[in-house]
Amino acid sequence: MAACLSAGVVSAANYADDSGATAFIDQMVKDYGFSEDELKGWLSQAEKKQSILDAISRPAEKTKTWAEYRKIFVTSSRVSKGVDFWQENSEALTKAETTYGVPAEIIVAIIGVETRYGQYMGSYRVIDALSTLAFDYPPRSPFFTKELREFLILTREQNRDPLSLKGSYAGAMGFGQFMPSSYRAYAADFDDDGFIDIWENRKDAIGSVANYFVRHGWKKDEPVVVRARTRAGYDKSVLNDSLKPLHTVASLEEKGFTPVTSLPGKDKATAIELEGEHGTEFWMGLNNFYVITRYNHSRLYAMAVYQLSQEILQAKGDR
């Protein structure tokens, strides 16, 4: 994922002298008791990466149609490897489903979409990614400055070297690609060994994904998303109007959308329009679909996770 060093580094690495970094260092010293010298030492070694700035400006979720996006993530190879991952980690996945109520296939699909089951966890140093985006990407500087803060607190809590950890171009880490704030808030010590590790410990990674979903409102045994039919004159204004379900199934039916599977009329729902391989598709996304988008704020992402999960579930049964 990372570009070669000559292409990835824009300038000599020394964020310690950056004005934004100076303010950040002052805050970390004052509010969190970090050593100024230690912070300057780390940030002086953090490298600005143009490849990170390029990647953040063109995420696949915003540049591809559903047909194009689906072909990336819902593939026979990813399905087969998902079944392998499930079989290799069946005990932890069963425990996670029992403990949290999140289906094993959803957990497997998240890890499959995020890292191809741990095969690609990212090759950027997390400190490079977060420093580049905190101090050289103004549109989201506040968010990534917060994540850099959370990352340094996390490494202190876990007694890890902040210069050694690697992740995605956005600073996401481990099997499930948790941002540092999510790591600190939702990662779980699922094997009860007293240490949370989502890089090497598959049990912790599995439990952490399930815990994240529950903490964001996953409802056990409820549907995720259902195909919908449209009638003449359907109300186009409600299509893709929000990731969060703002309507009810009944109100969407009044506006011309009928789920192909019967759903309680009072259930919250959103009307979705996607450009699929065979033309326009209409769906109703429910609460659990919205929960998947809390992981990545994209209906394409949530649909890929859901459809991959269903294909993995079927393939596991067939194997």
Image: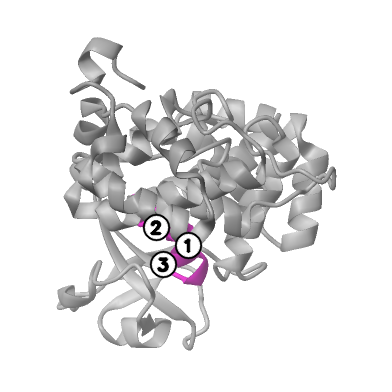
Q: Earlier in the sequence, mark 3 or mark 2?
A: 2
> Is residue 9 or residue 224 the one in the foreground?
9
Q: CA distance from mark 1 to mark 3?
A: 42 Å
**Residue at (44%, 54%) from the top-left corner?**
28
**Location of mark 2 (residue):** 27
**Location of mark 1 (residue):** 31
Viewer-nearest of labels 3 and 2?
A: 2
Q: Quadrant of residue 249?
A: bottom left
**Location of mark 3 (residue):** 285
Q: CA distance from mark 3 to mark 2?
A: 42 Å
> Is residue 40 or residue 181 the one in the foreground?
40
- The reply to whether the magenta stretch includes residue 298 is yes
Q: Earlier in the sequence, mark 1 or mark 3?
A: 1
The C terminus - image quarter: top right
**Residue at (63%, 65%) from the top-left corner?**
214
* Count of residue discs: 3
Helix, strand, or loop for circle 2?
A: helix
Amino acid type indicated by mark 3:
Gly
Q: Is residue 298 left or right of residue 292?
A: left
The N terminus - image quarter: top left
Q: Which residues are magenta?
A: 285-300
Q: Residue 50: x, y in percent?
A: 21, 27
Image marks 2 and 1: residues in contact by CB distance under 8 Å: yes
- The reply to whether the magenta stretch includes residue 282 is no
Helix, strand, or loop for circle 1?
A: helix
Viewer-nearest of labels 1 and 3?
A: 1
**Residue at (23%, 21%) from the top-left corner?**
12
Dot 1: within a 10 Å radius of its alpha carbon, few (fewer than 14), some, or many (20 or more) residues?
few
